[in-house]
C-alpha cells in the first residue's frame, strides 16, 4: 500500500484506522483499493468531492496516466472543470435521462451546465455587500485535540458577526473538522473559550448548543447528518421531533412530521420516492439537500456549514449558495468551511485561512485570489497589507 500510495501520490497511513482518518483520506483509500486490485475499467463516482485543489490536480494526472496505460475510465462528476481536464467525451444526464453526448472540444462549460439543469446557470452568486453587526460567535485561544490526543486546533481566535459569512479555507486535516466539532459540542475543548452571544458553550451538550439557535450542516452527512435507516421525514425532524407540533407528551405526531417533510422536499428539490423512504435510499446529493433543508428551516442565528455543495449538480449548487447568502442577508452569522476555493471566494465576506490548527490570515475575497489563498493554506505568508492575522 505504501509503494502504491507513493507511486500515485495518494498519501495514506497504512496502519491508521479508517474511522480515525479524515473524509479526504478515506476517499484516497477507496481509490487505492481499486488500483490495488489492478482493475482495467475504473468507475470514479465523485472522486474529488472531498479532495483539496492540489490533491484534485494529482488525481486528474493519475487518471491521464491510467488512460495512457490502457485503462478505461468512467468519471461521474458535477465539476465541469474536471470533465474538461480529463474527458474525451461527456454524456449529460438529467432526471435519469440521457440528454446528449458531446466531445469536450466542441462544448463550453455554459453549454454543459445548461444541458445539466435545463436552463442557463450563473457561475457567480450575486449578493449585496454585507452589513455585519454584533459578534455572535467568539473563539478565544482555542485548543482542541484530535482523536490521537494531539492538538489539532492550536490557540485559534476568531469572531463571527451577525450579517456576515466567514469562509474557512484550508487543506483537509488542518483542524477545520475539529474546530467545527468543538463549536457544535461534538468534541471536548482542551483549553480556551467559545462563546455564543456572550455565553460560554464549552461545557454544554450538543442539544444545549443547538437550542441556542445554532444550525449545523456537517461535512459527513452519513456519519453526522442523517440516520440512514430512518425515513427522510424522520431525518428532517431530527432536531425538532421532541417539540410541538411534532410531538406531545412524548408521542410523535407523524402526520405533522410527514407533511413538513413533503413541504421542505418540494422547496429544496429533494428528489426521491417520497418522505417515507429510508434516508439511505436517497442519492448523496439529495441527502445533502435534506440536511440543508432541515437546518435552514430552523432559522438559526448561527449557521455552521461544512462542504455545503458536496455532491450537488450546478443547478443545486446555485440554489443552495443563494439560500445560505439569504440567511446572511437576514442578519444571521454564517461560517462556511469548504475545500472549493471558488465557493469560498464566491460566498464569503471574509476568508479565514487555517493552517496547522491556527488562523494563518484573514482576507477580503474582493482583494484576493486562489494563489494568495494557496500560499496561506500551505503555511506561507503574504505581505502584512494582504493578510490581517
Image: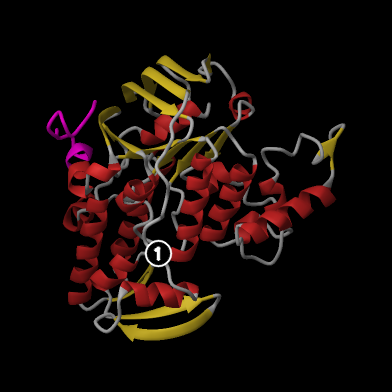
Mark 1, residue position: 122
Q: Position of residue 22 (x, y in %)?
A: 38, 42
The residue positioned 17% from the left and 41% from the top of the image is 375
Q: Position of residue 124 (x, y in %)?
A: 37, 58
Q: Main secondary structure of the magenta part?
A: loop
> Could you tell whether 139 is left or right of 296 in the image?
left
Residue segment shown in magenta? 375-389
Position of the C terminus, as image quadrant, is top left
> Could you tell whether 306 is left or right of 89 in the image?
right
The residue positioned 29% from the left and 49% from the top of the image is 52
Task: Please tell me whether residue 158 is drawn above or below residue 290 in the rendered image.
Answer: above
Using the rendered image of the protein, determine whether residue 5 is visible from the camera's viewpoint. Answer: yes
> Could you tell whether 134 is left or right of 35 in the image?
right
Res 33 quadrant in image: bottom left
Task: Please tell me whether residue 242 is drawn above or below residue 149 in the rendered image.
Answer: below
Q: Is residue 388 magenta?
A: yes
Q: Position of residue 293 (x, y in %)?
A: 61, 50
Amino acid at each position: 500500500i505504501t509503494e502504491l500510495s507513493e507511486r500515485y501520490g495518494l498519501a495514506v497511513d497504512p496502519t491508521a484506522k479508517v474511522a480515525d482518518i479524515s473524509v479526504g483520506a478515506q476517499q484516497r483509500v477507496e481509490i487505492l483499493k481499486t488500483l490495488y486490485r489492478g482493475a482495467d475499467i475504473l468507475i470514479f463516482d465523485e472522486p474529488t468531492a472531498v479532495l483539496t485543489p492540489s490533491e484534485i490536480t494529482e488525481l486528474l494526472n493519475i487518471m491521464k496516466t491510467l488512460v495512457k496505460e490502457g485503462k478505461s475510465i468512467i468519471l461521474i462528476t458535477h465539476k465541469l472543470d474536471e470533465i474538461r481536464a480529463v474527458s474525451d467525451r461527456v454524456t449529460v444526464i438529467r432526471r435519469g435521462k440521457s440528454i446528449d453526448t458531446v466531445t469536450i472540444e466542441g462544448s463550453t462549460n455554459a453549454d454543459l451546465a445548461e444541458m445539466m439543469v435545463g436552463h442557463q446557470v450563473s457561475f457567480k452568486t450575486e449578493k449585496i455587500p454585507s452589513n455585519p453587526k454584533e459578534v455572535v460567535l467568539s473563539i478565544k485561544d482555542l485548543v482542541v485535540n484530535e482523536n490521537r490526543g494531539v492538538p489539532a486546533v492550536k490557540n485559534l481566535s476568531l469572531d463571527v458577526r451577525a450579517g456576515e459569512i466567514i469562509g474557512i479555507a484550508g487543506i483537509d486535516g488542518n483542524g477545520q473538522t475539529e474546530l467545527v466539532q468543538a463549536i457544535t459540542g461534538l468534541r471536548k475543548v482542551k483549553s480556551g473559550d467559545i462563546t455564543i452571544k456572550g455565553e460560554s458553550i464549552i461545557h454544554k451538550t450538543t442539544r444545549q448548543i443547538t437550542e441556542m439557535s445554532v444550525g449545523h450542516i456537517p461535512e459527513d452527512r452519513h456519519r453526522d447528518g442523517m440516520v440512514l435507516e430512518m425515513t427522510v421525514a424522520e431525518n428532517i425532524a431530527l432536531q425538532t421531533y421532541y417539540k410541538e407540533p411534532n410531538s406531545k407528551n412524548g408521542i410523535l405526531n407523524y402526520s405533522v412530521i410527514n407533511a413538513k417533510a413533503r413541504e421542505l422536499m418540494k422547496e429544496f428539490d429533494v428528489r426521491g420516492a417520497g418522505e417515507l423512504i429510508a434516508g439511505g435510499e436517497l442519492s448523496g446529493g439529495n441527502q445533502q439537500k435534506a440536511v440543508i433543508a432541515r437546518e435552514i428551516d430552523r432559522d438559526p442565528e448561527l449557521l455552521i456549514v461544512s462542504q455545503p455543495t458536496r455532491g450537488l449538480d450546478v443547478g443545486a449548487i446555485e440554489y443552495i449558495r443563494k439560500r445560505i447568502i439569504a440567511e446572511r442577508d437576514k442578519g444571521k452569522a454564517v461560517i462556511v468551511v469548504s475545500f472549493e476555493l471558488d465557493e469560498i471566494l464566491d460566498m464569503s465576506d471574509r476568508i479565514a485561512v487555517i493552517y496547522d490548527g491556527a488562523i494563518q490570515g484573514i482576507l477580503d475575497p474582493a482583494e484576493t485570489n486562489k494563489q494568495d489563498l494557496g500560499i496561506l493554506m500551505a503555511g506561507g505568508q503574504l505581505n502584512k497589507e494582504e493578510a490581517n492575522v
